[in-house]
Amino acid sequence: MTLAITGLLYLGMFALAAGMSRHAPPLLAAQAKLAALRHPARWGWALVALSALLAIFAHDGGQALVLWFGLVPLVSAILLLGLTYRPAVPRAVVPVAALMVLLAPFV
């Protein structure tokens, strides 16, 4: 469950950052023209909400919710430091986060 929550939260925060005009060019690069990426902030809020719902309705709901509140600043710090020093790093973590979400039921 932790992998899915972390992966969804990272993908959501990445989409929220990509929705800002200042961060969109370094984060999206050549993919900025794709139709699915025209409103990344909407996708970002949906993914953040989905990760919160997953934490709320987990069988260890209280601990998962505390984990979610702890992961929000951690994931944000990873994005912030990646944007500051090397914008390619947050882009490279997106497939890893998606893989975390996909592999979560099997771990």
Image (tube, rainbow, N blue to C red):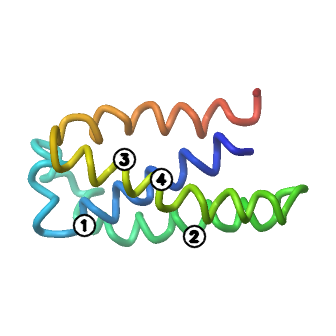
Q: Residue at image x 15%, y 58%?
A: 24
| For marks 3 and 2 on the same chain, the one whose residue lies earlier in the sequence | 2
Residue at which label 2 appears: 49
Residue at 90 percent across and 56 percent down: it is: 59
Q: 37 or 14: which is nearer to us? A: 14
Residue 7: which quarter of the image?
A: top right
According to the image, label 3 marks what residue? 78
Which residue in the protein does label 1 denote? 19
> What whole-number distance in Å separates the C-alpha atoms at marks 1 and 4?
20 Å
Q: Point out residue 66 in the picture as x, y percentages from the top left corner.
A: 72, 63
Question: Does residue 78 lie above or below 53 as drawn?
Answer: above
Give the structural element (helix, strand or loop) at label 3.
helix
Q: Which one is in front in this view, the residue at disc 1 or the one at disc 4?
A: 4
Q: Is 28 in front, or is 34?
A: 28
Callout 2: SS? helix
Calculate the distance from the C-alpha at mark 4 to the C-alpha at mark 3: 6 Å
Mark 3 crowdedness (10 Å alpha carbons): few <14, some 14-19, many ≥20: some
Q: Which mark is residue 39?
A: none
Lower position in the chain sequence, tag 4 or tag 2? 2
The kind of residue on which mark 2 rests is Ala
Q: Which residue is mark 4?
A: 74
**Marks 3 and 2: which is nearer the front?**
3
> What amino acid does circle 3 point to?
Ile
Residue drawn at x 33%, y 70% is 41
Instruction: Tell me if label 4 and label 3 are in contact, CB under 8 Å.
Output: yes
In terms of depth relative to the viewer, which is nearer, 104 or 39? 104
Distance in Å between CA atoms under marks 1 and 3: 17 Å
Lower position in the chain sequence, tag 1 or tag 2: 1
User: Label 1 neighbourhood size at 10 Å, few (<14), some (14-19), many (20+)?
Assistant: many
